[in-house]
């Protein structure tokens, strides 16, 4: 779990300096307005602009990196995590927190999975959440569809395997049967006046001609979204971009994406999909899910904050991220990783003397994210042989003590 803001620091023998996180990241031009020993601004710096790279980027009318939505699947994909046994009370708590955080959709386990799953789905649908729509994830089967629409959900996510692996060893059906069944289920759900998404499963090991054919068919009959799923986590960012870009030229509906993290590419793949024209990304808190999970909510937020911080901050209550992750970590009895995106113990901790000196002068030198945006605290370690005297001097000033530069330098060797 993430330590609370006022908690003692782990490894207390290696003292940390807590730096004022209200200090904004600043541009090179305004760096001279910052006191290099305490990191507080002497005058108000100009607003910070997103980092765009040395050469900038050509505009792309298909890119959605500044226009996307989250389908938060902790209560569906996350329930498939090996250590997840969510009670209804826990699910309701997480759902309410996700609503307050601002996610556009929450996806729930299929009501066909068990009587308990159906009861939980109905209970969450009856919460009357303010911002967030409720979806449930079902097989491409009429019995599942009938159960789903009876729960009161705002939409249904339909999925069926399209790769040769799944067609042979899972459901045993060919593409003709899959297409016919998809049309039947989609038309039924549409007749109930709620949202419908159709997704292939194992998209990146399916034949491209099969994918484009069925996506084109379901788009014509009016699905809200088609889904692309990297079910085994085999895809890389280039493959994702190529498939989504191709699909964007075939369908007019929204494109949802679902990336497993077996090879560590889930965040990069989600970003690449948005660049190619996808509109929705599936996430789970701490990335929990089947095997080693999917795109983590915090990781996606970190990546998208670099792309368009104003857009992200306008949509989501970012200060809630740590509380969300602590809640889920406690529920599944795991620790938030020390190097977790944004909320990890070491995410905003600086140690080397060169780093500390620059951070104290201008946090943008070694941070692309501002901890203050997430209610987090920046730390500079001073209890190690790698620590520079600037960090020691800063700590001395925080304690209202007096120590000249020579004494601060000598302190490092005592």
Image (cartoon, rainbow, N blue to C red):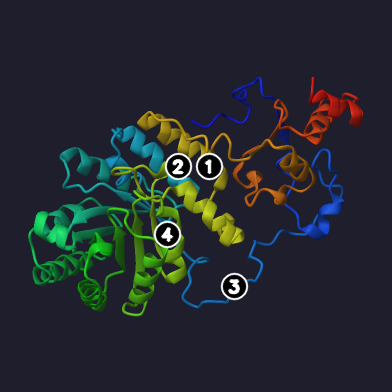
Query: Residues under labels 3 and 2: Cα distance?
Result: 36 Å
Q: Position of residue 28 (x, y in %)?
A: 78, 58
| Residue 112 image position (x, y, % from top left) | 16, 47
- The answer for how far apart the CA atoms under marks 3 and 4 are is 19 Å
Question: What is the CA distance from the residue labelled 2 to the residue labelled 1?
Answer: 8 Å
**Of label 3 and label 4, which has the lower sequence position?**
3
Task: Please rate how many residues cluster around mark 3, counting C-alpha atoms within 10 Å: few if below 14, some from 14 to 19, many from 20.
Answer: few
Q: Is residue 167 visible?
A: yes
**Crowdedness of circle 4 by 10 Å Cα count: few (<14), some, many (20+)?**
many
- Find disc 4 in the rendering and name its residue: 270
Disc 3 + disc 4, Cβ < 8 Å: no
Circle 2 or circle 4, nearest the eye: 4
**Callout 1–callout 4 Cβ contact below 8 Å:** no
Q: Secondary structure at mark 2?
A: helix
For marks 2 and 4, give the CA distance. Answer: 23 Å
**Residue drawn 8% across and 63% down?**
173
Residue 353 position within the rendered picture, expressed as x and y whole percent measured from the top left: 74, 37
Residues at discs 2 and 1 in contact (Cβ within 8 Å): yes
Residue topped by disc 2: 97
**Mark 2 or 4 closer to N-term?**
2
Kindly identify which residue carries mark 1.
320
Q: Nearer the viewer, mark 3 or mark 1?
A: 3
**Residue position for label 3:** 57
Name the front one of labels 1 and 4: 4
């Amino acid at each position: 779990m993430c330590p609370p803001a006022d908690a003692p620091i782990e490894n207390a023998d290696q003292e940390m300096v807590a730096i004022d996180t209200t200090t904004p990241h600043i541009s090179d031009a305004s760096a001279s307005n910052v006191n290099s020993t305490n990191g507080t601004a002497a005058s108000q710096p100009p607003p910070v602009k997103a980092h765009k790279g040395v050469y900038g980027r050509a505009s792309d009318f298909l890119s959605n990196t500044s226009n996307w939505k989250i389908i938060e699947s902790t209560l569906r994909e996350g329930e498939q995590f090996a250590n997840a046994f969510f009670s209804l009370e826990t699910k309701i708590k997480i759902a309410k927190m996700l609503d307050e955080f601002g996610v556009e959709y929450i996806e729930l386990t299929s009501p066909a999975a068990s009587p308990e799953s159906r009861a939980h789905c109905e209970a969450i649908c009856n919460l009357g959440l303010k911002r967030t729509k409720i979806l449930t994830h079902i097989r491409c089967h009429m019995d599942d569809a009938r159960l789903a629409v009876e729960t009161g959900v705002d939409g249904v996510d339909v999925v069926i395997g399209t790769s040769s692996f799944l067609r042979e060893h899972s459901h045993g059906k060919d593409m003709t049967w899959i297409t016919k069944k998809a049309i039947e289920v989609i038309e039924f759900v549409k007749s109930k006046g709620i949202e419908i998404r159709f997704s292939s499963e194992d998209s990146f090991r399916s034949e491209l001609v099969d994918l484009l054919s069925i996506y084109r068919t379901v788009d014509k009959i009016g699905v809200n979204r088609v889904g692309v799923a990297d079910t085994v986590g085999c895809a890389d960012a280039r493959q994702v971009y190529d498939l989504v870009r191709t699909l964007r030229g075939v369908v007019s509906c929204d494109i949802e994406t679902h990336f497993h993290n077996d090879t560590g590419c889930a965040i990069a793949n989600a970003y690449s999909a948005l660049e190619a024209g996808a509109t929705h990304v599936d996430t789970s808190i701490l990335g929990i899910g089947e095997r080693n999970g999917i795109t983590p909510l915090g990781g996606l937020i970190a990546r998208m904050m670099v792309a368009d911080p104003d857009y992200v901050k306008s949509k989501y209550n970012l200060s809630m991220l740590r509380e969300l992750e602590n809640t889920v970590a406690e529920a599944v009895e795991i620790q938030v990783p020390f190097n977790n995106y944004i909320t990890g113990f070491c995410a905003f901790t600086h140690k080397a003397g060169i780093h500390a000196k620059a951070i104290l002068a201008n946090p943008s030198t070694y941070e692309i994210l501002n901890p203050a945006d997430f209610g987090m605290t920046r730390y500079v370690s001073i209890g190690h042989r790698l620590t520079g005297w600037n960090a020691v001097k800063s700590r001395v000033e925080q304690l209202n003590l007096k120590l000249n530069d020579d004494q601060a330098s000598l302190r490092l060797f005592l």
